[in-house]
Amino acid sequence: MKFSNQLIYWYLQNDRDLLWRKTKNPYHIWLSEIILQQTRVNQGLSYYVSFVKAFPTVVDLANASESKVLKLWQGLGYYSRARNLHYSAKYIVNELNGVFPTTYEEIKKLKGVGDYTASAIASICFNEPHAVVDGNVYRVLARYFGVSTPINSTKGIKEFKELAQTLIDASQPGTFNQAIMDFGALHCKPQQPLCKSCPFNTSCVALKNQSIKELPVKEKKTKIKQRYFNFLVVLNAEHETVFTERKGKGIWQGLYQFPLVETQKSITKEELMSNSELEKWISTIDEIFLFNEKEIVHKLSHQHLYTKFWILKANNIKSPTISWSMLKKYPVPILIANFLKKFNPINGYF
């Protein structure tokens, strides 16, 4: 049986019951695809529901404030996805009269949309035969055809896209694309794939050569950078603190945080007290202590953040302050959100 036919036959018996599978609305499909970038389905589902509820149309999303979009995105990470989503929504409303683009080439012009997302939307919503290639597809193709070209190399990206394109069923491209993604997620899994019950087990090269664990191949990862964050949780007698928006193009752009002192290594209370950065925020400190005795290690894709939260009681605060009870209204990194769940001075911590 032809690969695409066999794959679709498997899919029709095993497809996942996902909310975005029940619509052809390109705006909703776009939302789901952006949310699911770097995110597992079970985690992304609730965010998809929240976004559709808060912003039923692309016009609603375009008219929202960036802060509201980031707050709703909080916890998903890779916040550039949310900023690009918001930017593109405004582009669709202002430049395309609120009409979502209907071709692969036009969809790909949206900020934050690459070949994979454009292929998914174009095939599912507009029946264009553009093959998707994501992590699941790389794995299925690498194993079935025995391809050892690194999937994160320029050559590999081109080679796998061309291979996927030769396999797609042009009469039902959306179904094919969803089938191969589901097959990789549910059957040809990264660990412990279901080879014994696999419909392709008589023709899979990796199974024949016993190289399932070796495929797909990835080039060596980028070296992980280690950073040391010291958040200054400044508090006065009125339970007011300093909370500022993170600027620049680095991580967490547009999110809010406590004043931050970044150091080259883990530091002690004495070393923090002698750091000149403190003078930006406080004239005199009445009391200081470390909230978390053990550093919190927050792992991002290319960096690990070794984090300490220092509680500083002071009444001579130089920067503008806000009430502690207002913090919940601001979008914050999950690292800050987790801290706020554990620490609340209004409940008599001091």
Image (cartoon, rainbow, N blue to C red):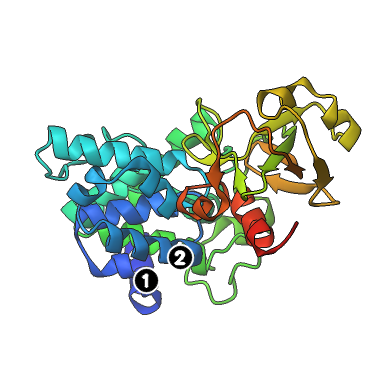
Q: Which is more toward the observer, 255 or 22?
A: 255
* Residue 169 visible here: no
- Residue at the far left: name it: 97
Q: Where on the picture, by quarter, is residue 161? A: top left
Secondary structure of residue under mark 2:
helix
Q: Are marks 2 and 1 in contact (CB under 8 Å)?
A: yes
Residue sitting at 70 percent across and 30 percent down? Answer: 282
Percent of width and height locating residue 330: 47, 48
Q: Position of residue 63 (x, y in %)?
A: 22, 44
- Identify the residue under disc 2: 183
Q: Residues within 10 Å of mark 2 (few under 14, many from 20)?
A: many
Q: Is residue 26 visible?
A: yes
The residue labelled by disc 1 is 11
Amino acid type indicated by mark 1: Tyr
Amino acid identity at mark 2: Phe
Say left or right for 243 vs 225: left
The front one of 299 and 308 is: 308
Q: What residue do we see at 37% from left, 37% from top? A: 112
From the top left corner, tell me how far across and down residue 199 is, in percent: 47, 72
